[in-house]
Image (tube, rainbow, N blue to C red):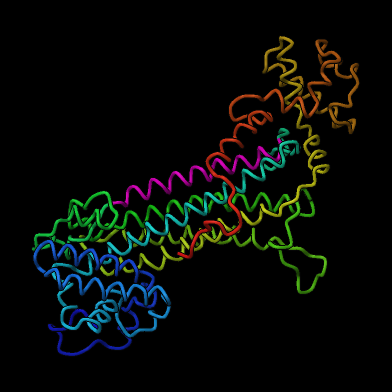
Amino acid sequence: MALWGGRFTEGPDQRFKDFDDSLKFDYRLALEDIEGSRCWAQALCRALVLTREECDTLQQALDELAQEAASDLKAIAAAPDEDIHSYVERRLIEKVGVLGKKLHTGRSRNDQVALDLKLWTRHAAEDLEQALNALLARLADSAARYTKVYFPGYTHLQRAQPITFTHWILAYAQMFKRDLQRLKNARELLNTCPLGSGALAGTAYLIDREQLALDLGFTCATHNSLDAVSDRDYVMEMLSVASISMVHLSRLAEDLIFYNSGEARFVELSDQVTSGSSLMPQKKNPDTLELIRGKCGRVVGALTGMLVTCKGLPLAYDKDLQEDKERLFDALDTWRDCLLMAALVFEGLKVDEERTREAARGGYSNATELADYLVGKGIPFREAHEVVGKVVLYAISQHKPLEELTLEEFKGFSAVIEKDVYKRLDLETALDVRDVVGGTAPPQSAFEIAVLRDNYPLKKENEDSPSQL
């Protein structure tokens, strides 16, 4: 069913129709379109455009239509209609006759689609918030299991200073906590209702737009009809939040791919998130992590595409904006799936504690401890730094770690070094002395784990799991 045509003397070319129609993807807005129509009927009734009896009839028919749509949403995509709005209107007219044609009074597809997509995005954000909460809960659980596991900290992919595996996990928890806050901020910004803006100039009927906004769960109505029908900031913002979070997921994946490699062998991924080779029977490939890393580009590409689509658009609505939905749907689906897969990776992750301890001790990662030791003996840090550099150069030439140098060898570089240096070079001491907010010391990790567990409790399997978007 076309919602236009009186001005035309012939129908559209089928090739144009195939190119132009959006039902093949905007069928996902069916329940939101029906929700908006139900509230619009109430608004028309309050404005005395519809009688109470007409409104009740429409409400009943829309409720039936919602139940039918919810039972098989994808089936709608096969209908011959131009878009989801024409589909809903056609089906409504089939149910209530000419009364269905009155529902579009004072409403445009421009404010209708703006409403539908905002409602869908709000629902999607709720699911994504659950997925982020679930990942943070899983990270808290994993962090609590590895508080005693020493781990090499890296800069420039060079072993730098010893940390714990817990500290590494908690670093990513901070990233995902920021992602969660960004998601909440995006939800707050999109919480204005565009319905009642008409095509671009507002509606000519006495619609109580503030009440309409409240009926639809928004904080308030939009305050400019031109902006309301052309605004896709919330789409770009959601894609931005998704892109940043996917970058975090990609970094997480890259770290674990390296830690899982045959060269590092720090961790082992479970069979549930890996696959084998069709040729090499010994292979156990980190496919889940590689896909997460790869899908980052897909989401970032959606953001880039949407920014470019919007950059030169004149006010108000332009058909270019039809390009928002496929990008948004795919990007948020992808983000959600990657969040859930990342949580699954941690569920079965195993750490080789002996190997990580050995690695944490290697690469002269306790050189900074020796410098700090010298500072404690009254040597300025810059001088201590130079002394330790020479000690490391000597130790390398002798093929010895620092802690295996004799006291006499140490004194050859600085007379202030005494037997207590060996305690300072110990791994446990290296961690314990960093007992400051955000440091790697076990008490700091314990505090951060407690905060995570309080705010993101680990739920039972399938309990409140994110629904399909």
Q: Nearer the viewer, residue 254 or 182?
A: 182
**Total number of numbered discs in the rendering:** 0
**Magenta span contains residue 182:** yes
Q: Magenta part mainly helix, strand or loop?
A: helix
Expressed as whole percent of the image width and height from the top left, the position of residue 154 reads 69, 39
Which residue sits at x=62%, y=43%? 140
Quadrant for the C terminus, please. bottom left
Point out the stretch of residues depicted in magenta: 164-191
Residue 200, quarter of picture: bottom left
Q: Is residue 281 left or right of residue 320?
A: right
Identify the residue at image location x=59%, y=48%.
Answer: 458
Q: Is residue 284 above or below residue 183?
A: below
In which quadrant of the rendered image does the N terminus lie? bottom left
Residue 265 is left or right of residue 442, and the answer is: right
- The spot of residue 188 in percent (x, y) is 34, 47
Depth check, front residue: 189 or 297: 189
Residue 381 colored in magenta in the image: no
Figure check: 453 above or below 127? above
Q: Quadrant of residue 397?
A: top right
Relative placement, left or right, of 52 versus 237 is: left
Residue 217 or 198: which is nearer the viewer? 217
Is residue 287 positioned above or below 54 on the image?
above
Question: Residue 313, how many percent across, how many down?
Answer: 26, 61
Judge left or right: residue 357 versus residue 155. Answer: right
Q: Residue at x 29, y 69 (%)?
A: 34
Residue lying at 85% horizontally and 32% vertically, measured from the top left: 396
The relative height of residue 63 versus residue 412 in the rendered view (above or below) is below
Q: 64 or 291, which lies in front?
A: 64
Residue 14: give x, y in percent of width and height. 31, 88
> In the displayed image of the protein, which residue is found farthest to the bottom?
10
